[in-house]
Amino acid sequence: MSLTFYDFTMAPSPRRTRILLAEKGIAHQVVQVDMMKAEQMGGDFRKINPDCTLPTLKLDDGTVLTNVAGITAWAEATYPEPAMMGTTPLEKAEIATWVSMAEQDLGMAIPNAFRNTNPAMKDRALPGPVNYCQIPELADRGLKMIDAFIVKLESHLEGRDFVAADQFSVADITVVCFLDFARVVGKKIPEDCPNLKRWRKHLGTRPSINL
Ligand SMILES: N[C@@H](CCC(=O)N[C@@H](CS)C(=O)NCC(=O)O)C(=O)O
């Protein structure tokens, strides 16, 4: 199978797919799309993904997948082992719950915090081909949401090695990608969060996390 993965190493969403492909051992070639040079908005890439976002995955039959959730669902269905979305109904429910919470409370909150005030992102408050104006209040709210999620996760990780279902999963991948990226708004795991620090250190022993 010949897959092409459109990636940008510094961005959190394509990192989620990069880790997933590595954990499942799915062979692929990589094309870097430099977001610092706005290559995701350029004509060449726009022809491949009109949404102008990363990650993007082109399958060998030419089908293009343009969304983390879609790529993840395809990868899990095509390569079920190792399971990354849980096996039992309750594991699946717990993992999906944490992915959804992390996407909202970090994955939306972090870009809200920097895209709504940064002058360089004027009218670029949301990713994609449509321009949206900045709403500075969303930056304040985003920072509060990140703090609240960190408090919740620190308490949740007491006695746990993984975010959900006692196994490494897309919940850990989602949280680590966004939590690491929170540095762009000055947030990192606080010193007084031993559970989060232990979890992050343990996760760092997996080669995929350091790709
Ligand atoms: N719907 C997409 C969105 C992912 C997303 O927001 N990706 C960011 C990089 S982390 C992006 O492509 N941003 C393009 C931009 O800011 O113009 C998904 O979940 O896969």
Image: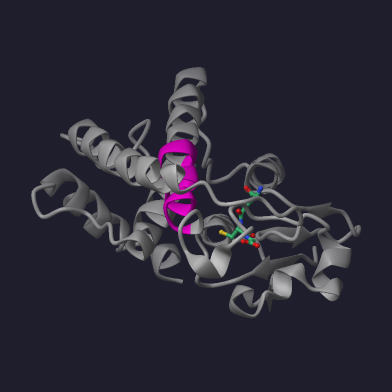
In terms of image quarters, where does ligand 1 lie? bottom right
In the drawing, does residue 69 fall left or right of residue 187? Answer: right
**Picture coordinates of residue 192 (x, y %)?**
8, 48
Identify the coloring: one colour
Q: Residue at x 69, y 59 (%)?
A: 53
Q: Residue at x 80, y 63 (%)?
A: 1
In the drawing, does residue 71 fall left or right of residue 19? Answer: right
Q: Is residue 169 visible?
A: no
Q: Residue at x 62, y 73 (%)?
A: 35
Rendered view: 193 above or below 31: above
Q: Decide whether the magenta segment is chiefly helix, strand or loop.
A: helix
Q: Looking at this view, is 10 or 74 the one in front?
A: 10
Rendered view: 194 above or below 159: below
Q: Residue furthest bottom?
A: 37
**Picture coordinates of residue 123 (x, y %)?**
64, 58
The stretch in magenta equals: 103-114
